[in-house]
């Protein structure tokens, strides 16, 4: 099945951005996000500077613009939600455009870092900066078994498609609800088996 939504292949491209150490990319992304969030509105100069920096990163990393646009549109509801919540505050009511631009810049920064840095490198950096081992292990397990969950959902989707003999849309929502319920049950059972196996190996 296609897992490009979880693990895109762009991080394996041989470009100067992909070859840049993960520490530098994570640190640079953190600086951009921090300055974008902390600077008072409207910080027009920083807005254009950050846009130029991120645009240069996009060009050097050779990430497809359509791919980035799809990701931005997928996460756009969250950006709009944050903007609407803050837009009613008197301090930001006159600068709602700055709120939108700030949210998009932060989101684009996260997308660029995550799609040019393998997740294993991110975990390695977290380990070097002394993030608690339990948190790193939890993140690694979540990332690993997210693929398992998606593969299980894909198998259930193919099985449902092979047993569906009607194209009427009014049947789709009840069927999807049943698939989601079965997926939750299977995920819970798998989690129990994994936990038992980890306890048997002394990990508590």
Image (cartoon, rainbow, N blue to C red):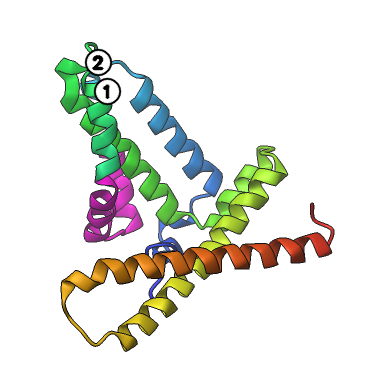
Residue at 46 percent across and 69 percent down: it is 182
- The N terminus: image quadrant: bottom left
Magenta highlight: main SS: helix
Q: Is residue 82 left or right of residue 33?
A: left
Identify the element where label 2 is drawn: loop
Residue at 48 percent across and 54 percent down: it is 117
The magenta-colored residue range is 48-76
Q: Is residue 6 magenta?
A: no
- In the displayed structure, 57 sits above or below 153; it is above
Q: Is residue 107 left or right of residue 200?
A: left
Q: Position of residue 189 (x, y in %)?
A: 61, 67
Q: Which residue is mark 2?
A: 89
Q: Position of residue 77 (x, y in %)?
A: 25, 43
Q: Quadrant of residue 142?
A: bottom right
Q: Is residue 180 left or right of residue 121?
A: left
Asked whether 183 or 115 is in front, the reply is 183
- In the displayed structure, 78 sits above or below 61; it is above
Q: Quadrant of residue 54?
A: top left
Label placed on residue 98: none
Residue at 24 percent across and 71 percent down: it is 172
- Can residue 4 be seen by looking at this rendering? no
Residue neighbourhood size for the residue with mark 1, other residues' Cα within 10 Å, grouped as few (<14), some (14–19), many (≥20) = some
| Distance of label 2 from label 1 (alpha carbons) | 6 Å
Asked whether 179 or 32 is in front, the reply is 179
Q: Position of residue 64 (x, y in %)?
A: 26, 61
- In the displayed structure, 35 sits above or below 7; it is above
Q: Which residue is mark 1?
A: 86
- In the displayed structure, 11 sits above or below 106; it is below
Q: Is residue 54 magenta?
A: yes
Q: Are marks 2 and 1 in contact (CB under 8 Å)?
A: yes
Q: Position of residue 55 (x, y in %)?
A: 26, 45
């Amino acid at each position: 099945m296609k897992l490009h939504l979880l693990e895109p292949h762009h991080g394996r491209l041989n470009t100067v951005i992909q070859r840049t150490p993960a520490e530098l990319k994570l640190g640079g992304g953190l600086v951009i996000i921090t300055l974008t969030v902390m600077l008072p509105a409207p910080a027009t100069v920083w807005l254009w500077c950050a846009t130029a920096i991120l645009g240069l990163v996009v060009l050097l990393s050779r990430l497809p613009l359509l791919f980035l646009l799809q990701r931005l549109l997928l996460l756009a509801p969250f950006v709009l939600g944050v903007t609407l919540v803050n837009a009613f505050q008197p301090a930001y009511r006159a600068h709602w455009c700055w709120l939108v631009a700030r949210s998009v810049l932060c989101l684009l920064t996260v997308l660029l870092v995550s799609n040019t840095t393998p997740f294993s490198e991110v975990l390695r950096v977290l380990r070097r900066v002394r993030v608690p081992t339990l948190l790193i292990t939890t993140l690694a397990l979540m990332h690993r078994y997210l693929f398992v969950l998606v593969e299980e959902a894909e198998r259930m989707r193919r099985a449902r498609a092979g047993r569906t003999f009607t194209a009427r849309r009014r049947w789709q929502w009840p069927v999807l609800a049943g698939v989601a319920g079965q997926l939750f049950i299977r995920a819970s059972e798998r989690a129990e088996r994994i936990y038992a196996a980890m306890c048997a190996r002394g990990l508590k």
